[in-house]
Amino acid sequence: MMDAAGIGALEDYLHRQIPLSAAMQVSVRFASAESVVLHAPLEPNINHKSTLFGGSASAIATLAAWTLLHVRLRAAEIPCHLVIQSNRMDYDRPVLGAFEARATLPDPDAWPGFLAMLVRRKRARIEAQSVLLFDGEVAGRFEGRFVALLA
Amino acid sequence: MMDAAGIGALEDYLHRQIPLSAAMQVSVRFASAESVVLHAPLEPNINHKSTLFGGSASAIATLAAWTLLHVRLRAAEIPCHLVIQSNRMDYDRPVLGAFEARATLPDPDAWPGFLAMLVRRKRARIEAQSVLLFDGEVAGRFEGRFVALLA
């Protein structure tokens, strides 16, 4: 589990490297090898119905999943680039206030094979998922496929 | 096809109602019943690799598809709320500069039935798609399912 200093540095990294995350006022609430939790207020992410804009929901879910893989790859000390290849997003209920995206691996057992493939073939794919949480309930679900390329 | 004044008003509406579209510096390039084209520069939408952040790509594709349906529903003079239910996004190639999202209906013939259902049942579903364009090539593909609710 990442301590407060590590979380602050990770949040600075996201805001600097991906300026939309600063515009969305995304903060990092928790980060470990098991999960990453990002938080954002509604105001910068609102839509015409005063609920969460679907594009913001998808963007924070993508960012949470990407950040989890980034944290894991950094811990593995394998310098690489990580980009998204495809995703699916389901919007289950309206989000009326501040919200979180919690990312996990759908299949943690795939991780060692992913790393081995990345080192051997210089390129490997992995899936990550996020749930969007509002008021203690799941408001959306994201499944993404990412590609890592050895730097 | 919408004239310059109509396009300006639509762009103002998007920036006001969905502030993330202003943060992304989205502009409306074209709008008709057949298609909507949105444009954005790379800088506010960049990632750690100096290419387009996947979350921005998905957000502008969502916004283009939503805007096309919004324009069509406004022309039909049916007051309703329009929200996204699910989407899939494929990221085909990196985007290295300003980009566009062009939305169309995958099945325009479904439109009359959609309107009839919306009036009769107060709720109806419709699909819209967007392609992400960079440097004259398709860089990503979005398919979304939207729900309209009679106001």
Image (cartoon, coloured by chain):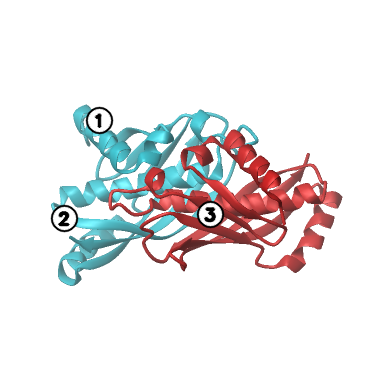
Chain colours: A red, B cyan
Amino acid type, label 1: Gly
Amino acid type, label 3: Ala
Which element carries disc 3, helix, strand or loop?
helix
Amino acid type, label 2: Pro
Identify the residue at image location x=33%, y=52%.
B105
Tell me which chain the residue with mark 2 is part of: B
Tell me which chain the residue with mark 1 is part of: B
The image quadrant that residue B34 belongs to is top left
Q: Is residue A81 visible?
A: yes
Q: CA distance from mark 2 to mark 3?
A: 31 Å
| Residue receiving disc 1 | B8
Label 3: few (<14), some or many (≥20) within 10 Å?
many
The image quadrant that residue A18 belongs to is top right
Tell me which chain the residue with mark 3 is part of: A
Establish whether labels 3 and 1 are both on one chain.
Answer: no
Identify the residue at image location x=66%, y=47%.
A7
| Residue receiving disc 3 | A61
In the image, B60: left or right of A117? left
Q: Nearer the viewer, residue B27 or A93?
A: A93
| Residue receiving disc 2 | B79
Percent position of residue B99, x then y? 47, 33
Assess whether mark 3 and mark 2 are in contact (beta carbons under 8 angstroms).
Answer: no
The image quadrant that residue B146 belongs to is bottom left
